[in-house]
């Protein structure tokens, strides 16, 4: 908790000053006490009150004064609040292994469907960008609120050779830098900023979905350090099983640089026979997430992938913000002080006069 006016906390001194005044008045009262013949008669004349009835109103009143004194300093709490400036860079692996059929009909088809459902589920004001990567990474759609443009771009995804996870992260950083002036592009020298230093995160987030390991370009952890230095979180998703399965692509999933080569025109399926599996570099994906303050998720089928993408906004849709909570201290102070004063008046009321 922090305070907008910390100097105003001097108001807290009112409580010890009141206690000191009460002690001084009690001392004077003792000095001016008179001598009576029978103390028992005076005690009998006074209304009976237990010690807790004498103390509770005082304690409540003092607690109320403390809360009111704190409120003068305008306290603030750092709370997680929804961000209305979130942009999400979705980087999707389109390497040849994404045609593996361990998840029917193949990984790329399932990932594309899940990504489209993810986009449709986001609030209309959320900006989403799309990066596709194989041996190189390219920005297909800059962060936008145009969902139709994003959905159409996903329909055009085609496989190619290689897997450049690190380059996908750098491309995503540059896309964010274009729209967020608080994020420096990857070519900007940030000096001696410690990559692992976590401060307030930017509202922009990078999500990397891949089924393999980095085979070309910059190391993913090195790229993650660049994201961390810019206070950008990276969430990674490892997609696929360890079960051997053939790689089969449809004609519209193959590019000229596909590992399957140029298939005959006119459609149909293309692929490699025999069982194959692509090893996911979970160690690297976990380090990427840890370095940037994100998380790594594993999805082995379409249902798990849908669950991960559906729950992701709960992870990065919040940001830390200092929210003033003065009202709650004022409310607590008034209630406590009022309750204390009310109890004191109620318990100290005299006997009601009656007519006999």
Image (cartoon, rainbow, N blue to C red):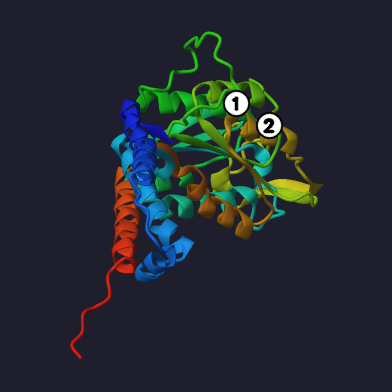
What residue appears at the point 58 percent right and 30 percent down from the top-left corner?
292
The mark nearer the N terminus, 1 or 2, is 1
What residue appears at the point 63 percent right and 37 percent down from the top-left corner?
95
Give 284 or 68, whichever is nearer the viewer: 68
Give 156 or 32, whichever is nearer the viewer: 32
What residue appears at the point 47 percent right and 11 percent down from the top-left corner?
188
* Residue 77 x %, y %: 41, 39
Give 179 or 319, whichever is nearer the viewer: 319
Which quadrant, please, contains the C terminus? bottom left
* Mark 1 vs 2: CB contact within 8 A: yes
* Residue 308 x %, y %: 58, 52
SS for dot 2? helix
SS for dot 1? helix
Total marks placed: 2
Q: Name the residue under label 1.
A: 224
Q: Mark 2 points at which residue?
A: 287
Res. 324 visible in picture? no
Judged left or right of residue 133, residue 28 is left
Between the residue at mark 1 and the residue at mark 2, the CA separation in whole angstroms equals 8 Å
Q: Is residue 346 above or below residue 107?
A: below
Quick one: which residue is furthest to the front in this view? 37
* Residue 112 x %, y %: 53, 49
Which quadrant, please, contains the N terminus? top left
What residue appears at the point 35 percent right and 22 percent down from the top-left corner?
181
């Amino acid at each position: 908790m922090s305070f907008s006016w910390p100097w105003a906390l001097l108001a807290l001194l009112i409580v010890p000053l009141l206690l000191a005044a009460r002690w001084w008045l009690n001392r004077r009262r003792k000095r001016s006490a008179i001598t009576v013949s029978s103390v028992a008669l005076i005690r009998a004349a006074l209304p009976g009150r237990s010690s807790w009835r004498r103390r509770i109103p005082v304690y409540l009143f003092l607690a109320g004064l403390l809360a009111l004194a704190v409120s003068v300093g305008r306290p603030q709490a750092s709370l997680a609040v929804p961000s209305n400036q979130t942009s999400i860079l979705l980087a999707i692996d389109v390497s040849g292994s994404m045609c593996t059929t361990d998840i029917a009909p193949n990984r790329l088809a399932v990932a594309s469907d899940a990504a489209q459902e993810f986009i449709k589920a986001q609030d209309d004001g959320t900006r989403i960008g799309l990066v596709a990567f194989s041996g190189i990474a390219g920005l297909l759609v800059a962060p936008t609120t145009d969902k139709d443009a994003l959905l159409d771009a996903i329909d055009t995804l085609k496989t190619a050779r290689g897997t450049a996870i690190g380059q996908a992260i750098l491309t995503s950083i540059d896309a964010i830098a274009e729209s967020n002036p608080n994020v420096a592009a990857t070519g900007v020298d940030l000096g001696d900023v410690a990559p692992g230093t976590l401060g307030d995160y930017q509202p922009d987030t990078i999500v990397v979905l891949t089924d393999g390991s980095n085979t070309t370009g910059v190391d993913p952890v090195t790229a993650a350090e660049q994201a961390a230095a810019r206070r950008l979180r990276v969430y990674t998703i490892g997609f696929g099983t360890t079960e051997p399965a053939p790689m089969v692509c449809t004609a519209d999933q193959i590019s000229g640089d596909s590992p399957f080569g140029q298939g005959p025109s006119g459609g149909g399926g293309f692929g490699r026979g025999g069982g194959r599996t692509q090893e996911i570099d979970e160690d690297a994906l976990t380090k990427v997430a840890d370095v940037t303050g994100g998380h790594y998720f594993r999805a082995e089928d379409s249902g798990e992938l849908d669950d991960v993408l559906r729950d992701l906004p709960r992870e990065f849709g919040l940001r830390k913000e200092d929210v003033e909570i003065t009202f709650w201290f004022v409310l607590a102070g008034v209630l406590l002080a009022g309750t204390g004063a009310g109890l004191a008046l109620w318990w100290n009321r005299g006997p009601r006069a009656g007519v006999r």
